[in-house]
Amino acid sequence: METRPPLPPFTRETAIEKIRLAEDGWNSRDPARVALAYSLDTRWRNRVDFPRGRVEAQAMLERKWKRELDYRLIKELWAFDGNRIAVRFAYEWRDDAGQWYRSYGNENWEFGADGLMTDRHASINDMPIKESERKFFWPLGRRPDDHPGLSELGL
């Protein structure tokens, strides 16, 4: 049986750990790696996409990162209870024409006893920004531990 610690029920510390692991995965921009955090029958709502199952979720991520270039993400705990975690996030990216965006959103996550995410409901808004307004400057990949989070950045 596949498991993905930390496992529910979550404490504040394990919820924060789960969020950071998710952030690290998404910042890898590796759809196959990220998809492994979700159950085989996961259900998503992501903008206008409604992937059902790990295979569809991975395909959506492949499309996402072909469109959202130089992607850098920060996630932060909003609330947790039992096997659920609510997250707020922001990420910066540019399109192939060079226009930068900061995307803001909230996610509601539900996990199985195995720690795999069974449900992911995301609400996301994109705001065009000037390159000079960017706040996320670490090298592509994992956000450094000493980089400010959303609250510290005033986001």
Image (spheres, helix red, strand yellow):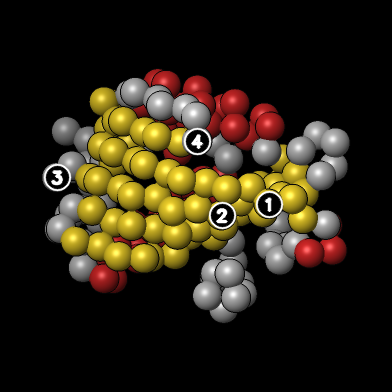
In the rendered image, which residue does mark 1 sit on? 127
In the rendered image, which residue does mark 2 sit on? 104
Residue 100 image position (x, y, % from top left):
77, 49
Circle 4: element type: loop
96 lies left or right of 122: right
Q: Amino acid at mark 2?
A: Tyr
Please tell me whether residue 63 is drawn above or below residue 97 in the rendered image: above
Q: Amino acid at mark 3?
A: Ala
- The residue located at (71%, 57%) in the rendering is 139
Q: CA distance from mark 2 to mark 1?
A: 8 Å
Q: CA distance from mark 3 to mark 4?
A: 27 Å
Circle 3: element type: loop
Q: CA distance from mark 2 to mark 4?
A: 12 Å
Circles 2 and 1 in contact, beta carbons < 8 Å: yes
Circle 1: element type: strand
- The residue located at (84%, 63%) in the rendering is 132
Say which label, 2 or 3, has the lower sequence index.
2
Say which label, 2 or 1, has the lower sequence index.
2
In the rendered image, which residue does mark 4 sit on? 47
Q: CA distance from mark 1 to mark 3?
A: 36 Å
Q: Callout 3: 10 Å neighbours few (<14), some, many (20+)?
A: some
- The answer to whether one can see residue 36 in this image is no
Q: Callout 1: 10 Å neighbours few (<14), some, many (20+)?
A: few
Q: Callout 4: 10 Å neighbours few (<14), some, many (20+)?
A: few
Quadrant of the frame with the N terminus: top left
Which image quarter: residue 94? top right
Say which label, 4 or 1, has the lower sequence index.
4
In the rendered image, which residue does mark 3 sit on? 113
